Image (spheres, coloured by chain):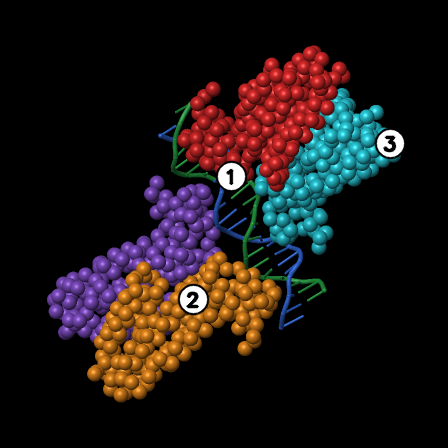
Chain colours: A purple, B orange, C red, D cyan, E blue, F green
DNA sequence: GATGAATGAGGATTCATTCAT
DNA sequence: AATGAATGAATCCTCATTCAT
C-alpha cells in the first residue's frame, strides 16, 4: 500500500536521472515501478508533485552520510572536514537528482516546501554548532540557528559548483573542499 | 542587438514570472512581445533557450546594482555590507526570475553555461578580494579566485533563503544580512 | 424494489441536474448515494442505463400531478386547463431532468424505449379523450389514441418552450398556457 | 478558410449519423473533413460545440423543403397538407441528425441557443398564419406569433414520434400525417 | 525578415469497470 | 450482496514548430 508510493518515488528518481524531468513520461515511471498508469494518480497529482518526496529522500541520504562519516570524538576542525567530505560525496553521487530537485521545485509552487524539507538537516547542524560553541570552540557572537543555514548553503553551493555547474577539472574537488573548509573555520571563528 | 530579440527576452521574463516556465506558451511570449509566432523562432530555438539570455540580464542587473551601491573609498567592512545589501535588493526584486532561471537551466543541458554566465560577476568579486588582500585587509592564505565564488554563493544563498524558500517574517531580512556579513568578515579574516 | 437501486436513481437525478450527464462521473453518483463504486454495477450496467429509470420516475410524477390536479366532475374545458397547468408545473420543477432524459435517451439506443415509457401516460390521455368523445363533447371524427399522443406532445412542447429553450420573460408562462389551451380546444373540436 | 468550418460541420453530420455522438471521436471528424486535428480546435472548442451549427443547417434544410413544396396559390388547407409533408419528409431523411441535435443540445449549455436557431423558421410560419388570418381563413382570436411556435412543435413532434421514438409500422406515417393535419385545421379554426 | 494559419505528434489524465476480499 | 483499491484503455487537446506567402 504505502509500498506503492515508495516504489513510485524510487522509480521516478531513476527515470528522472536517466532522461531528465522534462523528457520523462508518467508512463516511464509507472513502467519502472511496475504499477498501472492510473495508480500513479492515486498517490501523486502529477509528474512534478513527486519532486518534494524525492527531495525528502535526498535530505535523508545526506544526513545518513554525515552521521556515518563524522566522528564525534574527533577535533571540531576534523569533524568539519568530514562533514564537507560527506556533503561532497552525496552531491557527487546524486548530482543528477540534486539538479532535478532544484529544477523541479523551482518550476512549481512547491518551492516553499524547501524549508520544511530541510528542517531535519538544519536542526542537526544547529545542534552541532551549538555543542561546539558551548565547548568554547567557536566564536562567542555566533548564532547557531542562523549559521547552520549559512553553513549548509555554503557547503552545498560549493559542492554543486564542483559537480553540477562547472566544467571543472579533476583537481577542482580537492581545491574546493579545502577552500570551503578554510572559509568555514574562519567564518565560525574556530579556536585551535 | 536586435530590437525584436530584446522584446522577446523581456516579454519572456514577464510571462515566466506570471505563469511559470512550465505553463508559459510561446504564444504567450509573442503576444506580449507584439510579434508573430514564427518570428520567435528566428531568434530562439525554443522556449527554454531564452533562459540563458534572461540569466545574462540578471547578472548584469546584479553587477549594476553592486557598482551603484558599493563605495570604493569606504572601509572594506562597509563595502561588504553594501555588497550584501545590493545582492539582497536585486534578489528581492527579481526573486521569481531567479527561481525560474535556476529551474530553466537545470531542466536542460544549459546548466553548465552557468559558469560562463556568472564569469563577469566572479571576475569582479575576485578583483575586489584581491585588492583588499594586497592592501593587507584580508588573511594571507586567502585565494581570491576560489573565495570569490564561495562568497557570491554564500550571499546569494542567504538572499534566496530569505525571499524564495522561506515563510520568514519581516525581520528575517535584517537578521540574515547581519549574519552573512559577520560570517563573511570572519571567513575572509578581515583585519580591522 | 431495492432500496439501493432507488438511491442510485435519485442520486443520479440530483447529480445529472447539477453537472449534466456528460460531466457526471459514476463516482459522483455513488458518493451521493452513499454506496460503494462496485455496488453501482450490481444494479445498472452503465451511467446511461440509469436514464430510462429516471424517465419512468418522471412519467409517474407527471401522471400523479395530473391526477391530483384534474377534477373529473368539472367541465371538459376546465379539465383541459388543469391538465395544462399540471404539465407546465411538473416541467417547470423538473426542467433540467426532462432535458437530460431526452439527451440521455437520444445519446444511446434507448430512444425507442420512449414509447413504452410513455405508454401509461398515453393510455390515461386516450381514456380521457375517449370518455369526452362518448359524452359528445369532442368532434365526431376524432381518434382518441392518435390524438392523445399529439395532445401530450403539444402541451409538453409548449411547456419545454417556456422553461427550457426560451429566454422568455415572466408573463410567457401565462400566455403559452392560454394559447395551448385555446389551440387544444379548437383542435379537439370541443362543444361548449 | 470558412470553407474549413463548413467541411467540419458536414463531416461531423456524417460521422455523427454513422456512429452516434457518444462514439464519435474528434479524430473521426477531422479524418473525414480532410484537415488536421489541431485545425478542428481553431473553429470549434469541442465535439459538442459543433451541434448548434448542425442544427442551423437542419433548420435551413427544413425551410428550403417547405418553400419548395408549399404552393402559395393553393387552398390553405392544401398548403397545410404540403407543409406537413415537407416536415415529415425532412425529418424522415435526417432522423438521425435530428435525434443527435436534440441530444447534443440538451447535453450541454447550448440548449438556450434553440430559440435563436429556430427563429427563421418561426418567422416564416408566423407570416404564413398572419397572411391566412388576414384573408379571413383562420379564426379571429388567433395569435400568429404564438401559434406559429405551437404549430411547428406539433408537426415536428408528430414527425419525430413517427420516425424517431416509435417502432411504428409502415402505415403509421400516413395516419400521423392525417391526424396532425386535421388537428391543425381545427386548432387554427380554418374556414372551408 | 516577418507573418500566422495550419499542422499533428504526443502524453497527461480520466474514469468506467473489475475482482479479490 | 457489498466493497473500493487498482486498473489501463482510450482520447482529448495542447502547443511547439513549420512554411507558403
Between label 2 and label 1, give the one nearer the viewer: 1
Which residue is depicted at the point 53% across and 59% down?
A: B25
Q: Quadrant of residue D22?
A: top right
Q: Is residue A129 above or below residue F4?
A: below
Q: Quadrant of residue D183?
A: top right
* Position of residue A157 measured from the top left corner of the image (x, y, whole percent): 32, 68
CA–CA distance between discs 3 and 1?
50 Å
A152 sits left or right of B33 in the view: left
CA–CA distance between discs 3 and 2?
79 Å
Q: Is residue D117 above or below residue D136?
A: below
A173 sits left or right of C26 in the view: left
Dot 3: chain letter:
D
* Position of residue A117 measured from the top left corner of the image (x, y, whole percent): 31, 56
Of residues D107 and A116, the one nearer the viewer is D107
Q: Quadrant of residue D182?
A: top right
Q: Residues within 10 Å of mark 3 (few under 14, many from 20)?
A: few
Dot 1: chain letter:
C
| Image mark for residue A182 | none
Query: Split into 4 quadrants, where in the image is the C terminus of chain A?
Result: bottom left
Which residue is depicted at the point 46% across and 49% down?
A: A26
Q: Residues within 10 Å of mark 2 (few under 14, many from 20)?
A: many
Judging by the rendered image, the residue that carries numbered circle 2 is: B97
Judging by the rendered image, the residue that carries numbered circle 1 is: C19
Callout 1 secondary element: helix
Q: Is residue A154 above or below residue A31?
A: below
CA–CA distance between discs 2 and 1?
40 Å
Judging by the rendered image, the residue that carries numbered circle 3 is: D74
Which residue is depicted at the point 63% across and 24% down?
A: C81
Amino acid at each position: 500500500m504505502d509500498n506503492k508510493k515508495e516504489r513510485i518515488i524510487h522509480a521516478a528518481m531513476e527515470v528522472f536521472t536517466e532522461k531528465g524531468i522534462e523528457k520523462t513520461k508518467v508512463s516511464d515511471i509507472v513502467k519502472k515501478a511496475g504499477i498501472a498508469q492510473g495508480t500513479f494518480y492515486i498517490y501523486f497529482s502529477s509528474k512534478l508533485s513527486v519532486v518534494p518526496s524525492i527531495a525528502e529522500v535526498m535530505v535523508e541520504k545526506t544526513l545518513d552520510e554525515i552521521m556515518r562519516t563524522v566522528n564525534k570524538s574527533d577535533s571540531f576542525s576534523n569533524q568539519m572536514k568530514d562533514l564537507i567530505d560527506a556533503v561532497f560525496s552525496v552531491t557527487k553521487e546524486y548530482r543528477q537528482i540534486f539538479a532535478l530537485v532544484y529544477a523541479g521545485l523551482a518550476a512549481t509552487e512547491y518551492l516553499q516546501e524547501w524549508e520544511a524539507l530541510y528542517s531535519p538537516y538544519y536542526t542537526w547542524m544547529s545542534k552541532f554548532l551549538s555543542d561546539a560553541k558551548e565547548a568554547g570552540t567557536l566564536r562567542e557572537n555566533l548564532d547557531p540557528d542562523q549559521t547552520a543555514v549559512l553553513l549548509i548553503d555554503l557547503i552545498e553551493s560549493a559542492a554543486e559548483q564542483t559537480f553540477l555547474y562547472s566544467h571543472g577539472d579533476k583537481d577542482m574537488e580537492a581545491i574546493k573542499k579545502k577552500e570551503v573548509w578554510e572559509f568555514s573555520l574562519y567564518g565560525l571563528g574556530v579556536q585551535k
